[in-house]
Amino acid sequence: MALKNNQSLLFKGFIAVIAVGMGVSWMHDAAVDERVVTLRYLMLGAAGFISFVTPYLLFPDSKSKLIQLGNISGKKLLSYLFNQTFRYYLYFYLFVLATLFADSLAMGSELIIKSVYSIYALFFIVGLHSLALYLYLKVGPQSQFWQESEKGKELRFKLANYFKYPMDPGAIPSLVNTVVLALFGMLFVIAGTIAGNSLGFIAEVSLSLIVLSTGVMVYIYKSRKPERRYYHTNSFFSEFFGASEGEDTITARRKVDQLWWVPSPLRVNVWQYLQQIDRKIPAGRAVAAGHVLVWLVAYQKPDINFMVGIWTLFAVTHHLFILLSLQRNFSPHWMLRWLSPIKNWVFSWFWMQIRWLLPLVISMNAQLFVFGVPRTSDQFFIIAVYLASALIAASIGGIRLKKSIL
């Protein structure tokens, strides 16, 4: 048990080092004004990311049986749900701190502004995260209504026949929450930017305090008897992400032979992971949302090096899917060792990520045509970083898999 805890701490430490290292390498020689602008873009990205990924980090919850046995309820349950998701956002906050304070030219300069904006980022992330928890905790009854009611059946029929799109009506409340929450967060970032440019950075931080207080108060004081909503929502997501017989979904239609880019000996392994990932989180929509955010940043016509940094960061974040697949409740290590040698899984994780390479290249070249960035040389750099980081993440998975049986 102690060995497993040490491995977990080492792995978390490694991710933290990566987050800090990326922030340092990106902004170590930037002026404080550039750091503030970068932070605002990061908060726009955080608004989209938190609004989208929060329910998939929460549900279905593998610890729901333990929570039921322990009769955890009320504020204890709210605290548990907050910690389950916020620990992932802490790595992003470390990245934010690095972009603000890592200054190779003048480490001790403008510390007040840097500190105030670090508080601004923390308030914004905690507040929006709390609001997301409140919205998604009560989504179970709403989703069940749309999935089982006549309105939902009628909508499913119209989408399937008129638009040829196999959408489950039960996903509508989550989709609405995602859009509303993302717009809410992004509008506050824009309003804060206007206030900060006109009235000073204190006004901008004051607006983030509104986001914090609103989110925390709504989450704590309006989530009465959260255990009812928790069990209902967890049951819905467990059923929603389960493989239903005859269901027209991506996972039901995907065949092993369709993975043409994967070497034949690895196709079955990669196929299994793609099935699991797409049942846990709609990976395609997550990546598409990331591309939209990158294009929104490009629309502002920032510095070329800044855009290269954004593309590089986005490329590396694709490998969160590898980290997801490393979870024991996602794929037990004993089962992996029984199915294939460790090296096979390392290469499987690597080739699994190749599926995102073509959309990445297409999107970069389309942006080059429209905005003149990223240049061809920059694209080669981004692709090299993408492939290298994929191999590193896969190798880390192999190391964890090897140590898990020692």
Image (cartoon, rainbow, N blue to C red):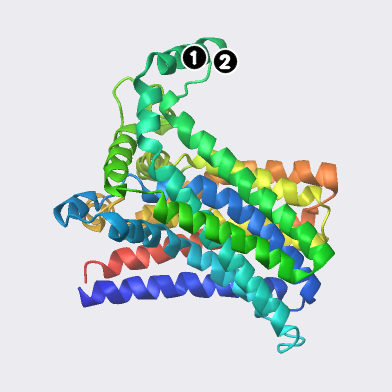
Residue topped by disc 1: 160
Left or right, 90 with respect to 381, comes to left
110 versus 354 height, above or below: below
Viewer-proximal residue, 45 or 384?
45
The type of residue carrying mark 2 is Phe
Residue drawn at (31%, 50%) of the image: 330
Residue 333 percent coordinates (x, y): 26, 57
Residue 316 percent coordinates (x, y): 57, 58
The type of residue carrying mark 1 is Ala
Q: Quarter of the image containing the N terminus?
A: bottom left
Residue topped by disc 2: 163
Residue drawn at (22%, 77%) of the image: 2
Name the quadrant containing residue 304.
Answer: bottom right
Name the quadrant containing residue 107.
Answer: bottom right
Name the quadrant containing residue 246.
Answer: top left
Q: Residues within 10 Å of mark 1 (few under 14, many from 20)?
A: some
Residue drawn at (70%, 61%) of the image: 40
Q: Secondary structure at mark 2?
A: loop
Residue 245 percent coordinates (x, y): 29, 23
Number of marks in the image?
Answer: 2
